[in-house]
Image (tube, coloured by chain):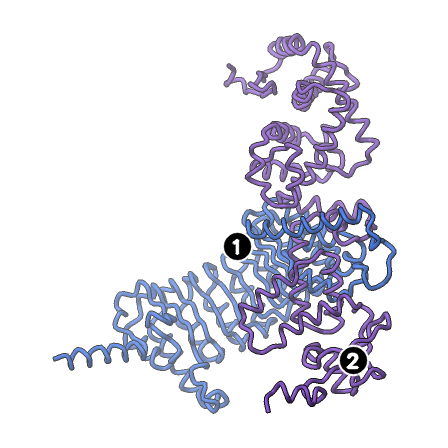
Chain colours: A blue, B purple
Amino acid sequence: MIGEAKVGNEDLNLCFEKLMMVAAGNSEGVKMNGVGITEWKDIPVELLLRIVSLLDDQTAIVASSVCSGWRDAICLGLTQLCLSWCRKNMNNLVLSLAPKFTRLQTLILRQENPQLEDNAVETISKFCHDLQDLDLSKSFKLSDRSLYALAHGCPNLKKLNISGCTSFSDEALAYLTNFCRKLKILNLCGCVKAATDHALQAIGRNCNMLQSLNLGWCDNVGDLGVMSLAYGCHDLRCLDLCGCVRITDDSVIALANECLHLRSLGLYYCRNITDRAMYSLAHSRVKNKGLTWESSMKGRYEDDGLKSLNISQCTALTPSAVQALCDTFPALHTCSGRHSLVMSGCLNLTSVHCACAVQAHRTFNTIFHTAH
Amino acid sequence: MSEVDMAVIKPEMMKSYIWLQTADGSIQQVEQEVAMFCPMICHEVIQKGMGSSKNYAISLPQRVNPAMLSLILDYCRFHQVPGRSNKERKSFDEKFIRMDTKRLCELTSAADSLQLKPLVDLTSRALARIIEGKSPEEIREIFHLPDDLTEEEKLEPLKNTTDDPRIRLLNRLYAKKRKELKERQKLKNIEVEEERVDDRSVDDLLSFINGDNGDSKGIKNSKSKKKNRRRKDQQKNTSANEAIKNHNKEPNGLNQVCHSAEVGQKVRAGVGATSNLHDVKDDIFDNKNELDDGDIDDEIDPALKEKIDREVEDFARRLNSDWPERMQEILSFGHERKPVHFSLNGNGSLRRYANSEQR
């Protein structure tokens, strides 16, 4: 901040110097109706937008109210905006900016303290039809009205984050998925009312391009929902079921069989998970190795299959099952450098190691022996 | 044979030149390796075979005047040498872009037309640094842009980006400065300024009383009612305003917030702002009817502002004369009927106390 201020000082001095020169009657002059080359307002739009893209969001907003030329350029060209720095006026700001910045594709409205209301989301839906990435996390004040508005106004949504929006209902979410079929990334962390089996069934039906879904702490999620999800969204790569305590092995088995591109799975606190689930995951990999010939042909064996698994607090699991899993998926690591198999709280799984951990152990033992 | 000898014998073979023509008609020749650093020139030479002689000089885009061309060529001359370290290049760049904003704009424009991406990036970043944190008015000044947006269009973003304390402060400073100038002209008393601070709270108090009894009790009814109407829109603002005015009397707080250069000049106005201002002002802007608030808004009709200011001054003068007696009157009256008690703070402003807290 101080550094910035220093630069500002320099430039400000230069500006004042220049103004002084002009005031003293410099012939170069401050002409409003000058010749083409030197008039800044004739700058090509792309160049202005390039400069605006280097500005922080607040300044970009200020720049859009400088003159009509800049306003038009910025309103036409601004595709990304983040308003998370607002502490109190985010709602009003959105209400006045959404009608102007109609080309927005990415809009981050994550709030530190809840400010956003339904009318703002309705305004966004009314004007920003190109919206692809919307972050409404921690918008406690929003109601279903917002979801209905988004469904009608923003059908191109690919990424939606409504984590923490506890007032949304599953009906509204299901309704949204019927219209926003291009969803790839959906974050429903903490949306207890919205993330139910009913909603998941709708997602499985409608959002077949879904790749990433976060259902953290949605304890209404059950096997029916996750199975519908698995059968509908075959491209699923990341699924977080952290805190979804009702989940049983059936869910994981369905996922293992249907979602062959699954890379990341979170089962933290899913106490009902047993070895059956682990073996099904391992088995599906073996079974499908033939199907994923492309990746094995290219030799990228590690790229395929689970890369990250969280089974913390899954106390029903036994070491043999988890070790089998670890052996099947070489990308799962227990070593400190690449810790991707997380088993906190599973005291009986301390013997499970990834291949590199075993190697290190072996090397250590060898050294130890030769020392004798 | 030494290299120098070779150079003397066959200069044309040692170094080739490219001919460039700027929009004003002047033609010059530039070392090939320097000129070819510009993609646009490179394209002309390779694809169209231009630039080999004076007659076939490459016509440069209109945005490249001779001054800019020489700057660009300096840049190219330095950077096209392969042996330089990153540190050297960075250092050169930093020194290179130190020029007034007008030339910087021209340079950006010229570099863009020649498709010289590294220079465009460099100059764009420099311009972005200049623009950052400035108000629209300042930006217009710096870049000589026309002021062609309607009041409404201009107002909104600035008002709504009040989360930036600097922009908010700027607005406040403008308003405050205008007010101070008026004050100094008419009333040469610092005391009166303090009275004006109390105006708001008195209004608050009066409107509360007037609203309930409808009695004037020696207070100008018309003035209060007029202010009442205004205040009705901003009831929740008044206490905030009071707080702001109190804060404004403390210039020391300024240093914490205003270390940025763009308000450096205005600091001398002696206005104080602390971080409390942050939240207080947010409350004000929650209310959409901000145009009525002469303190915060620096863009309302100046004539109307004048009128309001003069009214306030008149009222202040009237109050100033028999303030203590008035206060007694109000207090005694209030004591009989109202459950709420008023008492004076140290700095002369009023505060409400709930019944239980009466001193």
Image point (52%, 67%), residue name: A213
Which of the 4 image quarters holds residue B167? Answer: top right
Task: Say above or below: A313 vs B202.
Answer: below
Residue B17 horizontal/vertical position (percent): 74, 82
Q: Which residue is mark 1?
A: A164
Q: In the figure, is residue B336 to the left or right of B216?
A: left
- Few, some or many residues within 10 Å of mark 2 (<14, 14–19, 20+): many
- Few, some or many residues within 10 Å of mark 1 (<14, 14–19, 20+): some
Image point (52%, 57%), residue name: A191
Q: Pick whichever, B94 or B190, lies toward us.
A: B94
Q: Quadrant of the C terminus of chain A?
A: bottom left
Task: Say above or below: B3 vs B301.
Answer: below
Tags 1 and 2 both on a single chain: no
Find out whether the residues at labels 1 and 2 contact each other: C-beta distance under 8 Å. Answer: no
Image point (71%, 17%), residue name: B210
Q: In the figure, is residue A74 to the left or right of B275?
A: right
**Secondary-structure class at tag 1:** loop
Q: Pick whichever, B77 or A353, lies toward us.
A: B77
Q: Pick whichever, A331 or B186, lies toward us.
A: B186
Task: Say above or below: B204 vs A362.
Answer: above
- Amino acid at pointer 1: Gly
Residue A126 horizontal/vertical position (percent): 73, 58
- Amino acid at pointer 2: Trp
**Secondary-structure class at tag 2:** strand
Task: Say above or below: B243 vs A190.
Answer: above
- Chain letter of the residue carrying label 1: A
Which of the 4 image quarters holds residue B75? Answer: bottom right
Whether residue A35 is visible, yes or no, is yes
Residue B19 horizontal/vertical position (percent): 78, 80
Q: Which residue is mark 2?
A: B19
